[in-house]
Image (cartoon, grey):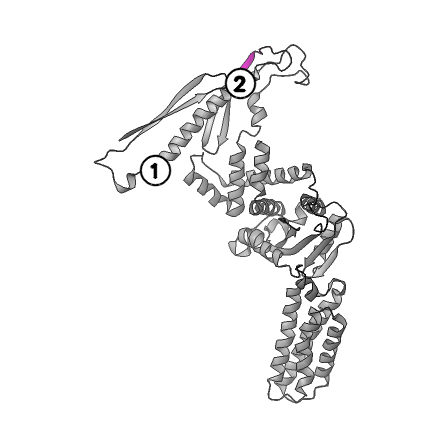
Amino acid sequence: MDVRIIVETTFENGTTKRHRLGSLSRPFRRTQPEGFGLLLEDAKTILGQLQKAILLDQFEEISQASRICPDCDGVRAIHDYRSRVLDTLFGRFEVKAPRIRRCACNAKSDGVLSGPLSPLADFLPDRSTPELRRLQAELGARHSFREAARILETFLPCAKQVNTSVRNRLGKVAREICDSEQTEPLVPPAVEEASALTVFLDGAHIRCRPEYQKRHLDVVVGKIESHDRCRRFGLVQQAVLSPASQLRQDLRALGWDHEQTVTVISDGEAALPNLVRNAVGGKVRHILDWWHISMRIQHVENAVKGLLQIGGFSGIPVLFKRPAETLRWYLWHGKVMTATTSLQWLIVDCTWLNTDDRMAAEAARRVQARCRDLYSYLANNMDSLTDYGRRHRTGRPISSSGAEGCVDDIGNTRMGKRRRMRWSPKGAHRVAVVRAAVLDGRLTGAYQRAAA
């Protein structure tokens, strides 16, 4: 069996052109199991030839249309031809790009009369297609740069990929994402009652390159949720001039208009809600993450259980057991003062506990340490505590679990410590921005809008 592949192009003026791309041979009697259908190498060859045929016809049509002056409808002369290398997803091609002389009618659309016009430079200023840059950025955000280059070369008939090219293209795409979001119009909230925004914040720690004289970099990651949409974000504060400005862009993308209520849920790190306060330019409602409170309560409960199980314990068990059991209930229902009082009584009872048993004394000191840790945590975040039970019953979030997922999705999966990579602040920031856009589907949407 012989297969011939022919492509026919029809231009806007009605003329047609045919290209013979090649042929495939599949002899019936000599066909092996791996020879059935279209092979990967055959597909890559055919795609490369098809891409070349389409590009040449497109350049020819664009050149002919660009020669018509938009003001006087006269035909402009061709100044010369320049060889240009165009990098696409299906190969790298060298084309002859014409440069067109400007019309003598003092055309207003051409601006200042200077040199010849280059139609190819207007369409592809970077000499690469947006689809290639988008795929390089997406793969670079999901895998290592070297692995992304290998995947592209394996499955596509593109030119030889270099890891530095993938890294540079990802950085350029990250800048384009930030610039495009600055110019996008605000999206008004759909429903007045659902105008509140919730920001989940957390931090990821990644290895830093040695020349920056730091062991780790802090990547701020999180998620912004409205009544019907959500948006992930990631940034390195040392790599941008204004971290608050970038976070403000993410808030505006979800319809924030300086009057909406912004609620921040974090683990108690003071720098995280302060970042949102700087972005909003005013007060925000900060809620302490319930999961971190619950874990500290669990530590107190375990320490009290260990104290009561020791044979040398000489106190009254109910004085230790009941405060530990009711502590979680008090904090869940917003009774903070009662909970702190129970913690203080636990500390006092452990101090008055008379025992000569060394293990019991160590267990009592352990209970005191756990109680002091929880008491300090609650005292430092007293303004961020709320009635968690009521919020949970009304369907409002009480935990920063959304940000915890972003730590894995944006930080650890691509830049985690176990991957043995070291990052500069600028490189980590660009990867975080692109990876958040990839996970949200914003990278494809931005390039679709640009193409339209």
Q: Quadrant of residue 45?
A: top left
Q: Position of residue 143 (x, y in %)?
A: 50, 47
Q: Split into 4 quadrants, where in the image is the C terminus? A: top right
Q: Which residue is under mark 2?
A: 63
Asked if marks 1 and 2 touch (Cβ < 8 Å), the reply is no
Seen at 50% across and 26% down, the residue is: 85
Residues rendered magenta in the picture = 74-81
Q: Position of residue 171 (x, y in %)?
A: 59, 40
Q: CA distance from mark 1 to mark 2?
A: 36 Å
Q: Position of residue 363 (x, y in %)?
A: 63, 81
Along the viewing direction, whichever of 319 and 160 lies nearer the viewer: 319
Q: Quadrant of residue 116?
A: top right
Could you tell whether 64 is left or right of 176 in the image?
Answer: left
Up/down of 300 relative to 280, above or below = below
Q: Which residue is under mark 1?
A: 39
Badge 1 marks a residue whose secondary structure is loop
Whether residue 289 is visible, yes or no, is no
Q: Position of residue 65 (x, y in %)?
A: 55, 17
Along the viewing direction, whichever of 85 and 88 lies nearer the viewer: 88
Determine if the magenta segment contains residue 182.
Answer: no
Q: Split into 4 quadrants, where in the image is the N terminus? A: top left
Seen at 54% across and 15% down, the residue is: 80
Could you tell whether 22 is left or right of 396 in the image?
Answer: left
